[in-house]
Amino acid sequence: MTFSEENYLKSIYTLQKEHPKGVSTNVLSKYLDTKPASATEMIKKLDEKGLVHYQPYQGVILKDSGAVSALKVIRKHRLWETFLANKLDFSWDEIHDVAEQLEHIKSDKLIRELDKFLGYPKHDPHGDPIPDEAGNIAKLEKKRVSQLQPGDTGTCIGVNDTSSSFLQFLDQQNIRLGSVLEIVNIQEFDKSMTVRIDDRELLLSQIATEHIYVRI
Amino acid sequence: MTFSEENYLKSIYTLQKEHPKGVSTNVLSKYLDTKPASATEMIKKLDEKGLVHYQPYQGVILKDSGAVSALKVIRKHRLWETFLANKLDFSWDEIHDVAEQLEHIKSDKLIRELDKFLGYPKHDPHGDPIPDEAGNIAKLEKKRVSQLQPGDTGTCIGVNDTSSSFLQFLDQQNIRLGSVLEIVNIQEFDKSMTVRIDDRELLLSQIATEHIYVRI
DNA sequence: TATATTTTTTAGGTTTGCCTAAACTTTAAT
DNA sequence: ATTAAAGTTTAGGCAAACCTAAAAAATATA
Ligand SMILES: [Mn+2]
Ligand SMILES: [Mn+2]
Ligand SMILES: [Mn+2]
Ligand SMILES: [Mn+2]
């Protein structure tokens, strides 16, 4: 399997969540930063290999074999992200691009040993579940802080806005990866939230609560 | 720089040691398991990019810029080999093939962080020196046991024969990576050697001494 | 329903890296 | 010095993965 085939399968897997009855060549090529004509070609090849189901003008969906292949790449991607964040000094926003390359290394032993070395992690640094060797994957337990109710708690696993002003704000408030947040209450009129972090209480605007991801 | 260009530069660097006045397309293509015509093509391209000096029928040699590029790939290869052997449970004979893939990952930060994580190693698990960030590389201190003299000592860093019968023999004699050998004496008539390992003395045939590498 | 717009596919090209077979150059052997 | 053998380059092709432009199909609009 080529790098390109792996990237297409992985992308189809991801996009299927939002397009359950078929991922169009338009959507797929936009996601992969190629052109629709290129997506059509690749999809036809993957169909001939029995990895996807393709009907002209109807989009693609993965067959079981295609989903298994996609999940293997996703497993590698997330294990490498975990390695970069936990063992090397990479921050959560630097890991994706490098993992995008590392996910294509071919060695079953390597990925098994890496998994062991990392202590068989269940989630990557963004809070996304890591599939097991057989391709089983847990349901995503990631939410925005804005989706929580008073009394709920969550562990900060990432943000949606990487502007330095927002990151500086988080730093000032002592909110970082791993911080445990508990929702104290929600202001009805502006959806701002009072949250408890490290026994301190602080107020977050609606915009802020929508930009912080937690694992519940 | 493509994977293929990197592989050619690295190969030329290695083969130059044995062919100082020019690596022929024949030698190069044999080493890379391609055909001479393919080597000619690639060499012409590398010459146009100013990385090698090529004159038809006279072979290639690296220019300074080409040697710098080659050493960067070699640095990555050897750091990854060290990672696989020291941090994951890979044996010394399993690391090369995986490192052959990992050496092409593009990220300056990754290789800097990996170097730090490994404790800035000076040699890879085969005893070969690891170039620094600037491309400086120490002279190789690797020898075959057969090249040592009585009184010399060396640390076992690899073998030249990976047949299971030879590896079993080493295992029986308790010779492993890191074992310190001291040459006690050499039999003139058959070049067999008496060596001391862990305060035991044992006899190695000439064939055996030629198949064991040590760092001196 | 008929037409216009958008989406998708097809047709024809390009680049990279590989190949084989033929032509050419160098080296070795009479 | 000729000729034979070996090594090297050139010429012409192929597969993968991309592209643009034109044709075809599906969808939206009047
Ligand atoms: Mn990622
Ligand atoms: Mn990728
Ligand atoms: Mn190696
Ligand atoms: Mn390589």
Image: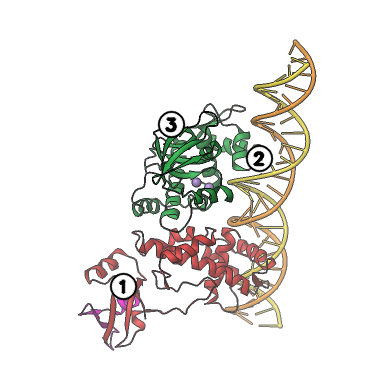
Chain colours: A red, B green, C yellow, D orange
Q: Residue at x 42, y 64 (%)?
A: A117
Q: Are marks 1 and 2 on the same chain?
A: no
Residue annotated with mark 2: B35
- Secondary element type, mark 1: loop
* Residue under pointer 3: B149
| Kind of residue at disc 2 | Lys
Q: Where residue B24 appears, x then y in whole percent?
A: 60, 31
Is A86 located above or below residue B100 in the figure? below
Secondary structure under tag 2 reads: loop
Q: CA distance from mark 1 to mark 2?
A: 54 Å
Q: Position of residue A67 (x, y in %)?
A: 58, 72
Q: Are marks 2 and 3 on the same chain?
A: yes
Range covered by the magenta-colored residues: A187-210
Residue in the image at 55% along x and 63% along y? A7
Q: Position of residue B92 (x, y in %)?
A: 48, 50
Residue A36 picture quarter: bottom right
Pick the front one: A124 or A17? A124
Picture quarter containing residue A90?
A: bottom left
> Which badge, 2 or 3, comes first in the chain's sequence?
2
Local SS, label 3: loop
